[in-house]
Amino acid sequence: MLRLVRCADALWERWLEKVDVVSEGVVGAEEGGLVYRGSTSLIVLSDRHGGLIPHAAVSEAAQVAMRDPHFWLRAVRAARLEAVSRCQGELSTIHVDLKVGVDPKGIRADIDVDGRVSTAADAVKKKR
């Protein structure tokens, strides 16, 4: 059974102002074209580490983040932006795997991203 919750989106927006982001990824040739594979880790920092989430509320906030589609969407958007910055073309449809948990510094989201990369040559082929 999937249980979803909803936190005020404005609260996530505010808390995500203070986030630590680490990202890595690479574009490689595979059958069918270029593919981006990478990962992004976001840590929404607690007030003890320069963020805005009260340290005493991190565990509870992480439980909400695990079930809140608003948080998921914001985390995936950040990971997609990181992926786009590493591509030499347009990043089309992506597939993501998102894991959320507690980190000593706050709430941690690990997002694995896989997606097709469209190049200028691909655009020319589509026009033909």
Image (cartoon, helix red, strand yellow):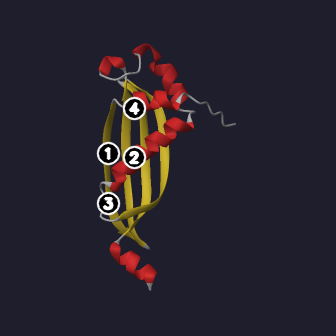
Disc 2 + disc 1, Cβ < 8 Å: yes
Residue at point 70%, 36% (across, down): 1
Disc 3 + disc 2, Cβ < 8 Å: no
| Numbered tag placed on residue 79 in the rendering | 2
**Circle nearer the viewer, 3 or 1:** 3
| Numbered tag placed on residue 87 in the rendering | 3
Looking at the rendered structure, the secondary structure element under dot 4 is loop
Residue at point 34%, 49% (across, down): 82
Q: Front-most of 93 and 1?
A: 93
Between the C-alphas of marks 2 and 4, the distance is 13 Å
Q: Earlier in the sequence, mark 4 or mark 3?
A: 4
Between the C-alphas of marks 2 and 1, the distance is 8 Å
Looking at the rendered structure, the secondary structure element under dot 3 is loop
Q: Earlier in the sequence, mark 4 or mark 1?
A: 4
Density class for disc 1 (Cα within 10 Å; few <14, some 14-19, many ≥20) is: some
Q: Amino acid at mark 4?
A: Leu
Disc 4 + disc 1, Cβ < 8 Å: no
Q: Amino acid at mark 2?
A: Ala
Looking at the rendered structure, the secondary structure element under dot 1 is strand
Residue that mark 4 sits on? 16
Between the C-alphas of marks 4 and 1, the distance is 16 Å
Q: Residue furthest right?
A: 1
Vertical order, 69 against 34 (above or below): above
Q: Position of residue 47 (x, y in %)?
A: 35, 18
Residue at point 46%, 40% (across, down): 74
Residue that mark 1 sits on? 23
